[in-house]
Image (cartoon, coloured by chain):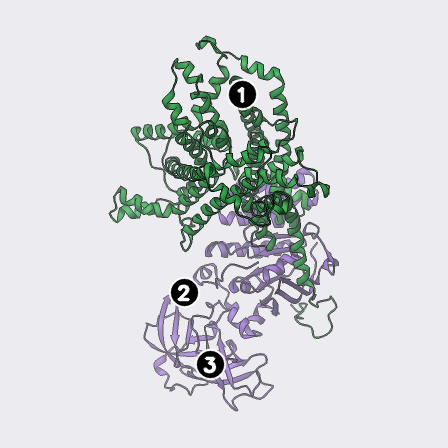
Amino acid sequence: MTARLRVENLSKSFGAARVLDRVSFTVPPGRFLVLLGPSGSGKTTLLRCLAGIERADSGSIHLGELPLARGRTHLAPDRRDLAMVFQDYALWPHMSATANVGYALRRRRLDREQARLRVERVLERVGLSGQAEQYPHQLSGGQQQRVALARALVAEPGLLLFDEPLSNLDADLRERLRVEIATLTRESGATVVYITHDQAEAFALADEIGVLEGGSLVQLGSPEDVYHRPASPFVARFTGLAGELPGELAPGSAGGAACDRVAVRTAAGVVTAVRGDRLALTDGAVRVLIRPAAVALARDPGAGSGSDGDGDGSGGPGGGPAGTVVDTAYRGRGYDHVVELPGGARLTGIFDRRAHPRGARVHLLLDPEGCFAFADPRPGRPAEPGTAPAPAPAPAARASAADAAETDPVRTTLEVR
Amino acid sequence: MAETTTATRPPGPDPAGADPRPHALAAARLRSAARALPWTLFAAVLLLPVGGFLLVAFSPRLFDQGGSWFTLSAFRQVLTGWTARALVDTCLVGAAAAVLATVVATALAWITERTDLAGRGLWRLLLWALLLAPSYLESLGWTWLVEPQGVLSRLLGQDPAVLRGLVFGPVGVIWVLASRGVPFAYLAVSALIRGMGREFEDAARTYGAGRAATARLLLPILAPGLWAGFAIVFAESISDYGVAATLAAQANFPLVTGAMEQSVSTFPAQFQLASAMGWLLLGLVALALLAQRRSMRGRSFTVLSGRTRPAVRSRLSARGQAAALGTVGGFFLLSLGVPAFGAAAASLLPSGGRVTLSALTLANFRQVLRSGEMLSALGYSARMSVITASAALVLGAFAGRALARRGSGAAGRLLDLLLLASIALPSVLLASGYIFTYNLPPASELGVNLYGTSTLLVLGYLAGALPSAARLLSGSLGQISDSLLWAARVHGRPAASAWSGAVLPLVAGSLVWTWLIAFCGTLLELPVSQLLAPPGDEPLSVAITRQLQGYDVGSGAAMTVLVVAAALALIAAALGALRLLLPAAHRLEAVA
């Protein structure tokens, strides 16, 4: 039943506001695509277009060979062979858990006994055998979400849609349900489109991540691609930064047009960074965007004799910029630090197993792989420590359940529909 | 991963027609206008006649009602003499009734919401009964009780002249209007009291405030509810016709609505005067609503938040319980019990002779049932009410849905405005407008021959019933999240089956309630019936009030008792059936 989802040039406007602007992507059968974007980026509208709740102005959607929307044709939601988990769960309050799940199975026209068995099995699979006859209002938030998940899975649809299903849950429950969604959907073999504004959730779940900005799909790739090669400052910021350093290209420090690294002179010293898309070597003002995972505290700050400004950012211990610890937060496995650099920029979420007290002078090691240089359209703007989203765990070291509870994901405001 | 394409903005020509349609915006506007069209048409049929009627006060020549194109003489005439007196009296009576109703309702709401008073379900039920009973029924109950040769005088063997003096005068009028207004004020205040939590009280007490200081602190928090209650009761009272036509008329205590009805139904009809009075009435209603809105301006009293816990009911001591029961019971005794007793006694008493227990007779009931007059009136009114209630339900559901989605554009805002306007329009004004406009030569020239037909009566009823039906339904329909319906669609149910499976059970309770309220309200409706009933068909309320005019008190009372009993039986049957057929709906009932 699983099928390829193909979206081509999908556009949608509400009045004068363009919420989807020629979005195209393909999800191969059985793959898990996460669409990531802040509120107002159009991800909910995109999902509702896929479900058939919203009618796109132009473009096409195909599920396998079946056109869901193309030109003037618009297949009704009930004829699209898909299932959806809603942000508010949308459980029918007058039906028990069993009835809710069973209602979604009616499309398969099974006989009564078969249907009963199937509902029983899927409820057991989500761990709700004991609550099968309870009504939604008698269930906890997590249990309600499990019923919604069971309801989506029971008819084994070809396409599963998830509309920020974890956003109403607390951190611990969110992580547990995240694991269940990841395993159960992959077991079902369905093609999945999942939207969220939480980058940690996106990285943890996705086979592919699409980043939406202002109704456009600005990057689509594997989680590793998006993390290590963000297509724009927006993508880099939205997927988690420790901070930003304004500066300018150090002349002659880059290895030529073919080389993907550049040296940037900042107030905190010279920093080597990956050359971002569309950064010309003639560009003057540059911003270096730094991933939290790319920053480490030098083991032995005392050994570093390097004066500020002469490090190349990629050297050995003590070769990076120096700064002052302004905050230390205990995180169980170790400590997160906020370090203020010369020039006033702050880097947040710098992890070390050892605590460095507030006010201590430290030397930082910057991994060029996690530093991205983009042209700065508004040079001279000071770094804003508060604007960068909270750091995400690097995909390489994916968070355990306990970690997810520690790191606060980006919380944006209500999704505008 | 390799299979995933990253074609976000293909440079080449666009195969799927991605060109943003230039006329999309215009099309959207057109769709929005098309959505508004049915409502506009409907409003034209329902409200435009009132507009024409209101114009005649300024420009009688426009409608062949006088010589001048623009004049204020009607206003001059209305603002002198007995109509001026009626206007002042209406204002005073309305204000007094509103104050009284707000005070009583606040006390009732506090007792029923914040204490463990016994029989809370019964009290709420009685409030609903009070809300549904038309004002002239309460007036009639009191009248039958205190009139010369009435129930009291025959039971006691002595004329209750002092009590009659009170009832047939401002005090009686104010009391009947106030007690009728209490349910409205209760609805406005009780939600606030329920949601307020105990935090404010506890905080005040913690900082050393005594009982009086705490009350002073809480009153401003309750202010929005109190103002809303006052405004609603004032508007309802001054536009009430039932009391004006019964108690006030007998007491020679003219009120504006009564005066309007008189000007319209005398021959030749003085539409110009009635129209001027309509303006003044409308002005007063608008003033009340404006005062309420002003009192809210710049203040935010969001006392309901996710953090507020429902207040714990305070436990009443035995003495407190008795006092509270006495207060609540006393109110309902005076507002429902006494008039009900008056009606029941008047219907059971023999037409003459000494009154003893053994002399009580069912002769009046027998006569009513045998005469056929009452049965035909009941049959006629029931037919009209079924049509009206069903139409109000269907149209109200659509309007309510549009209202709940307010902000969805011009259509929603327009509808909101229209409904507000027709709620604020007194029924007498509405009915006068219909008589006037549909009687004009252009109406028949256009082929609209509604004057003197049952269709016009139903339209009049509908104009009265639709706004409240829409409001009631917008509440419960607005609570139904869109995603419930979409969830059913997405999981494979076609539109109709998705609605009936996922939404209908949740709103069935409100639908039944709305229908019942519209039905009962129409069954005993007086002002529109009085003015718009077609010749040859007599609605129930007209038959009952006609019999009150003296010639057969016993039959009139028996008729009233029978109709009220039948209406109560219908409500009980409908709610029982609902409970039986839709147990889940009962549990989740939004209204009640």
Task: Judge whether residue A189 can be spotted in this image.
Answer: no
Image position, residue B28 (x, y; %)? 66, 59
In green, which chain? B
Q: Inspect the image, locate mark 1, and give the three-letter code of the amino acid beneath it.
A: Gly
Splitting the image into 4 quarters, where does residue A35 fall?
A: bottom right
* Chain identifier of the residue bearing label 3 in the image: A
Q: Could you tell whether B101 is left or right of A204 in the image?
A: left
Q: Inspect the image, locate mark 3, and give the three-letter code of the amino acid beneath it.
A: Pro
Image depth: mark 1 or mark 3 in front: 1
What residue sits right under mark 3 in the picture?
A: A246
Please tell me which of labels 2 and 3 falls first in the chain.
3
In purple, which chain? A
Question: In front here: B560 or A217?
Answer: B560
Mark 3 falls on what kind of element?
A: strand
Image position, residue B296 (x, y; %)? 42, 51
- Whole-angstrom CA distance, mark 1 to mark 3, is 91 Å
Same subunit under labels 2 and 1? Answer: no
Image position, residue B537 (x, y; %)? 64, 27
